[in-house]
Image: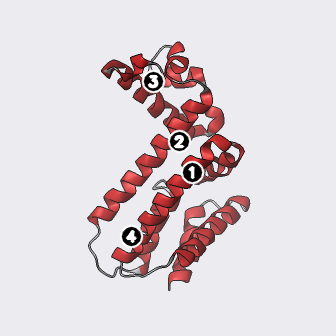
Amino acid sequence: MTSAASTPKGERRRAALVAAAADLLVEGGFDAVRHRAVAERAGLPLASTTYYFDSLDDLIYAAMEHYGRSELARGREQLAELSTERRGTDTLVELVLDQLLGEDPEYDAVLLRYERLVATGRRPHLRPLMRTLAVELRALLTEIFVRSGVEIGGRRLEQLIALVDGAVVNALIEVDPDPRAAAARMLRAALS
């Protein structure tokens, strides 16, 4: 990133490019994040993507970090609103699924989310970021359980995450129109 990006105008432009790339990533996966598409979405000249980012990989990294941090911030807002009390299993299940699957229950949104997660395996430059975000997500989930009156260890949390992931992947393979509901059923049964 050049020094012009450190000016207020440069910071705004860079942020607009990152937000545009994150939106495209969520809407269409990694293939949707292209220099031209990002610049058009941000309302900036095409050259701005290469001016503010050394490569498309750098732009994708920034978009993934922006999106991941935004989701964690949303989850922390939900957590801040929780009182420390036992809550029903259904409420806890929805809170956990919001963190793992996002708030959009539509089939395509869940499918794109899992496609993105799997595709990061082919992008070694994203692995350290994904590990960092995963640690923060697990800490958030643990706190949600604790505030809900459910003590949970790291091993049990990993089992529940794997259960949700498996239920979602199976639902996607079966073209189940509601993979979130499939995951909710499995998670609810595991927590009951």
- The amino acid beneath tag 1 is Met
Q: Which residue is mark 3?
A: 42
- Choose the circle earlier in sequence order: 4 or 1: 1
Location of residue 168 in the rendering, given as x and y in whole percent from the top left corner: 63, 63
* Position of 12 relative to 90 (above/below): above
Element class at badge 4: helix
Q: Disc number at residue 64?
A: 2
- The amino acid beneath tag 2 is Met
Crowdedness near tag 2: few (<14), some (14–19) or many (≥20) residues, C-alpha within 10 Å:
many
Q: Residue at x 51, y 36 (%)?
A: 62
The answer to whether 11 appears left or right of 171 in the picture is left
Q: Are marks 1 and 2 in contact (CB under 8 Å)?
A: yes
Crowdedness near tag 3: few (<14), some (14–19) or many (≥20) residues, C-alpha within 10 Å:
many
Q: Residue at x 55, y 19 (%)?
A: 50
Q: Which residue is mark 1?
A: 130
- The amino acid beneath tag 4 is Glu
Q: Disc number at residue 143?
A: 4
* Position of 73 relative to 187 (above/below): above
Marks 2 and 3: which is nearer the front?
2
- Choose the circle earlier in sequence order: 1 or 2: 2
Element class at badge 1: helix
